[in-house]
Amino acid sequence: MSLDNSTENRVLNFDSPGDGAPIETVQRPRLLDRLPVTARTRKVIEWFSVVFAVYLLITAVNVIGSGFSAATGGQAESIFTFAQNPVVGLVIGILATVLTQSSSTTTSIVVGMVAGGLPLATAIPILMGANVGTTMTSTIVSLGAAGDRNQFRRAFSAASVHDMYNILSVAIFFPLEWAFGILDHVGTWFAGLTTGSDGGIIATIFTTFGNAVSAVTDPGANGVEAGLTAALPPVWAGIAMIAVGVGLILMVIKFISSMLKVLLVGNVEKMFHKAIGRGPISGIFSGLLITVMVQSSSTTTSLTVPLAASGKFSLWQIYPFTVGANVGTTITSMIAAFGFTGGQATAAMTAAAVHLFYNIFSALVIFLVPFLRPLPVLGASWLGALGAKNKLYVVAWLAGLFVVLPAIMIGITALF
């Protein structure tokens, strides 16, 4: 890792691949970079800015919940009939995340919408689709190694293992959820345990914390709601609140991720070096922890690409990080759920718990079932070899996964 004192840019070097592998440069926001303060004071300000950004995130989710309720007039279930087909919901989750390049953004918005009345059965496929949509970022990062065939094969394989893992997860749990509602039941149970009146000490702790968070964030959310409601008719005010909330979430999550990468870059680098090669359990927990630290699974998975491109680590060593990253990214929606109280808190926590347990169950099933565990690696290796042979295969894969396949899925369901 190097530090240029003149610009205070920080570079994630990972022992310098030195052979063309992409290296991620992390730079603090320019506004903070220009503050005429000492390094120590700057760091304090940066940490406070992260805390304030989390406050804005929770406030934004709260605004979306209120806006969705106002815009739908309590008739969300009838209005969103088109998304009641689970396949349509899955496609919405994929495309929404591709557009925002952040599963945390999609899941936070969904948590707010569920709190505002969106049926959980409609939300669950969207949450699943968010996992698939977020894989596009690491694929784009792998293109930085396109100049060398061997490097690109390794880089594209490392990026594609995230695709393959999440596709396999959906292939397993999507039909199970459709048939048995497993995640619906588990999410409802967890929300009852943490926010219900019969949850005992656990519910008391969660409810007390949630009430404290709401007491801080509600004034801001109520201010936005009051201002827009006074200026616009109820439905349009609700739509405007949703737009404001989504815009805030997009900006805030990007800011949080950028700032945490700057503040924690040294620790992240050390964790990568210590964990990789020490076995799948170490890799999973390290990927989880790093993603919680930087608040972005796309960052965690993208950082593995240069390691694979350089040949320093194998695909089997990188693979567990993607699994841990999927679990770690659920922390954002859990945080967002604390912005509500009462029945809204239960609904929001249910949606957040669905996202959490979906990723936990996926990791357990795929890694504990011997014939499932190697499938993402085998698929990614095959795809990497094709991509290295001809870059058109990469274009075809991206178009097929994020455009053609969703269109085919919607077309098939429209016929039945």
Image (cartoon, rainbow, N blue to C red):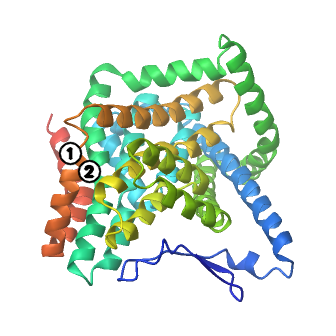
Q: Quadrant of residue 215?
A: top right
Q: Horizontal and vertical percent for residue 385?
A: 15, 67
Residue at 79 percent across and 67 percent down: it is 43
Is 245 in front, or is 192? 192
Give the class, few, some or many, for how many residues have Cα within 10 Å of label 2's Cα (few <14, many ≥20). Answer: many
* Relative to 31, residue 323 above or below: above
Amino acid type, mark 2: Met
- Check residue 399 in the rendering and tell me which mark sits there, or answer none: none
Q: CA distance from mark 1 to mark 2?
A: 8 Å
Residue shown at 31%/70% (left/top)? 311
Q: Quadrant of residue 111?
A: top right
Q: Which residue position is annotated with label 1?
A: 375
Q: Quadrant of the N terminus?
A: bottom right
286 lies above or below 19:
above
Observer able to see residue 223? yes
Are the residues at dot 1 and dot 2 in contact (C-beta closer than 8 Å)? yes
Quadrant (top left, top right, bottom left, bottom right) of the C terminus: top left
Q: Which residue is mark 2?
A: 164
The residue shown at (66%, 74%) is 28
Mark 1 or mark 2, whichever is nearer to me = 1
From the viewer's perspective, is 232 left or right of 25?
A: right
The amino acid pointed to by label 1 is: Leu
Residue 400 drawn at (x, y percent): 20, 59
